[in-house]
Image (cartoon, coloured by chain):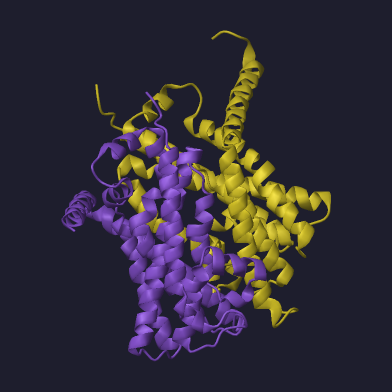
Chain colours: A yellow, B purple
């Protein structure tokens, strides 16, 4: 081994993963048309949902349904729009596709850790999305509507931290999902059935606060809580410490789960071709 | 007449071949079809929980709102069976890779060829769940199924499907210009139907006007629902507008067709 000592190794290690992070950031930055159309889509759906919640609360403006008042519900609407780009990656199929085609084997020959490399790359993507696709809808909505967003720097920082944690959980869920490709080449079909259920339970359809008690307990206990509703609750200032604690716990638990799955999968990996 | 019949036979054969390919993996096919229906079920669960939690939405009960969701979903399912692959996410690849050159050399209409060879039968799952929701909601809302009402419901689904398909065609036409896929079209195909899930009373005049007179989803979903429920409708949006629905849909389809032809004129191959 050239170079000297563990300190030098650590520096090289950090440098390598930072380079991947910046590559992820830059790749997302090249999709300019996607950014504009994504923002327009966020604006449209945000407007429709805003109209919906105004209409629901119109008859009872001061009502608190399921623990949410009008301002909280509107904050939910625009946080959902802000979170969409953070938790979803347009290149979600690249990992399972690489597994299916066998290209993934190249990943195993590279130095470092394949899981950490993907995480660094995805975090780069997340930071890009947060910078443009999350802040713009939120700032726009906050300027025009009575949202319940935090006003102190510490509060804003906590929302940002919660969003990053949500993006790590989302990456881990996507990763686990991608590993399905090790076992079944028709992973997309499985995704088609799983996705609607995830969509509902995570709170993308309506806030889980409006769910009946049993379904709500299920949603709050699931890792999907850490992906969407935890940042929403942090934003409206409801059970902030417990939401963040759950997110950290899920980041660790899913991290372990995805690494174990990957090592199991690599043991049964068969590479086709010669 | 003979030529038209021959063309239909060609399209039918293409579509049958596509279908046979899809069914070759039965498990995957069933899962995909279930998936498109499951999306609607989650929407309905959401709407029911929300409207029941608050009591009503702009004077509409939960089953009445589900009727809107069902009509929209059934129409969207129908439209996407034919239009899904024209949307930029997929079609941009056809344009980018130059595969469209080959489509142009075939002795069929390019649009007919695209539609017939990429029929997406899985969206029948969405159509079936939507239709089921209409039947369920109509029962709960006390709709009296007379023949005219049945015809209005069928017209709603067909017109909504035609609008979704027409927007997909416009999305395909737009791809000839942008080449890169643009998701903006989804605002209309998915967004237009999402917006139609709720009574138009909740929207401001701007959104209402756009979805009534520009992309007439309100005429295809909301207005027929008024007729089924025996509601008069708010000022400026009476149930009698249902008479206008077919004409407005046909007009929009005509625009989409003109847009497609302009797009093809603009198409330049990608070279090699």
The single residue placed furthest to the front in the displayed view is: B1
| Quadrant (top left, top right, bottom left, bottom right) of the C terminus of chain B | top left
Picture layout, residue A124 above or below residue B159: above
| B87 horizontally vs A234: left or right | left
Residue at point 74%, 79% (across, down)? A61
Q: Position of residue A14 (x, y in %)?
A: 63, 25
In which quarter of the view is residue B91 placed?
Answer: top left
Residue B106, percent across and down?
A: 25, 40
Q: Position of residue B235 (x, y in %)?
A: 62, 83
Q: Quadrant of the N terminus of chain B?
A: bottom left
At x 39%, y 49%, the residue is B86
- Along the viewing direction, whichever of B120 and B149 lies nearer the viewer: B149
The total number of labels drawn is 0
Say if residue A166 shows up in the picture: no
* Nearest to the observer: residue A51 or residue B15: B15
Q: Taking the image as drawn, is residue B223 in sight? A: yes
Image vertical order of residue B211 relative to residue A262, above or below: below
- Outermost residue on the top side: it is A2
Q: For residue A242, which quarter of the picture?
A: bottom right
- Which quadrant would residue B203 be assigned to in this image? bottom right
Tell me which residue sits at (33%, 56%) in the image. B82
Looking at the image, which is closer to me, A261 or A149?
A: A149
State left or right for residue A247 relative to residue B185: right
Q: Residue A236 at x, y = what percent?
A: 72, 62
- Image height of B113 relative to A108, above or below: below
């Amino acid at each position: 081994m050239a170079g000297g000592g563990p300190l030098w190794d650590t520096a090289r290690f950090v440098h390598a993963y930072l380079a991947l992070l910046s590559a992820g950031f830059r790749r997302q930055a090249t999709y300019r048309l996607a950014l504009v159309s994504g923002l327009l889509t966020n604006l449209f759906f945000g407007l429709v949902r805003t109209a919906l919640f105004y209409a629901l609360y119109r008859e009872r403006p001061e009502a608190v349904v399921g623990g949410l008042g009008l301002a909280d519900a509107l904050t939910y609407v625009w946080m959902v729009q802000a979170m969409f780009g953070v938790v979803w990656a347009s290149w979600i199929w690249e990992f399972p596709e690489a597994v299916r085609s066998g290209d993934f084997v190249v990943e195993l020959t590279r130095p470092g850790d394949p899981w950490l490399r993907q995480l660094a790359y995805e975090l780069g993507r997340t930071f890009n999305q947060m910078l443009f696709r999350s802040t713009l809808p939120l700032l726009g909505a906050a300027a025009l509507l009575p949202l319940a967003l935090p006003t102190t720097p510490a509060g804003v920082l906590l929302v940002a931290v919660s969003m990053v944690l949500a993006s790590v959980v989302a990456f881990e869920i996507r990763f686990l999902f991608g590993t399905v490709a090790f076992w079944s080449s028709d992973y997309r079909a499985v995704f088609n059935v799983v996705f609607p259920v995830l969509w509902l339970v995570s709170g993308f359809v309506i806030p889980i606060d409006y769910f009946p008690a049993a379904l709500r307990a299920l949603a709050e206990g699931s890792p999907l809580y850490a992906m969407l509703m935890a940042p929403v609750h942090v934003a409206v200032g409801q059970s902030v410490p417990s939401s963040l604690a759950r997110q950290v716990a899920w980041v660790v638990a899913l991290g372990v789960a995805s690494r174990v799955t990957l090592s199991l999968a690599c043991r049964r990996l068969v590479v086709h071709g010669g | 007449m003979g030529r038209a019949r021959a063309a239909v036979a060609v399209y039918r054969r293409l579509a049958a071949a596509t279908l046979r390919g899809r069914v070759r993996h039965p498990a995957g096919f069933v899962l995909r079809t279930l998936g498109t229906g499951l999306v609607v079920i989650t929407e309905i669960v959401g709407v029911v929980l929300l409207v029941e939690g608050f009591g009503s939405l702009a004077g509409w009960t939960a089953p009445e709102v589900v009727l809107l969701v069902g009509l929209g979903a059934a129409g969207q399912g129908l439209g996407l069976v034919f239009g899904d692959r024209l949307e930029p996410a997929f079609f941009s690849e056809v344009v980018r890779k130059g595969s469209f050159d080959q489509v142009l050399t075939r002795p069929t209409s390019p649009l007919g060829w695209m539609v017939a060879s990429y029929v997406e039968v899985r969206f029948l799952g969405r159509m079936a769940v939507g239709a089921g929701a209409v039947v369920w909601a109509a029962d709960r809302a006390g709709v009296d199924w007379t023949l005219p009402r049945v015809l209005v419901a069928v017209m709603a689904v067909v017109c909504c499907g035609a609008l979704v398909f027409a927007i997909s065609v416009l999305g395909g036409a737009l791809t000839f210009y942008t080449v890169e896929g643009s998701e903006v079209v989804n605002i209309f195909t998915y967004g237009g139907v999402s917006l139609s899930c709720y009574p138009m009373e909740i929207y401001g005049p701007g959104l209402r006007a756009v979805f009534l007179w520009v992309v007439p989803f309100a005429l295809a979903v909301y207005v027929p629902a008024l007729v089924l429920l025996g509601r008069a409708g708010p000022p400026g949006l009476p149930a009698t507008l249902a008479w206008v629905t077919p004409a407005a849909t046909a007009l929009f389809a005509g625009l989409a067709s003109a847009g497609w032809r302009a797009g093809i004129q603009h198409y330049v191959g990608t070279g090699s």
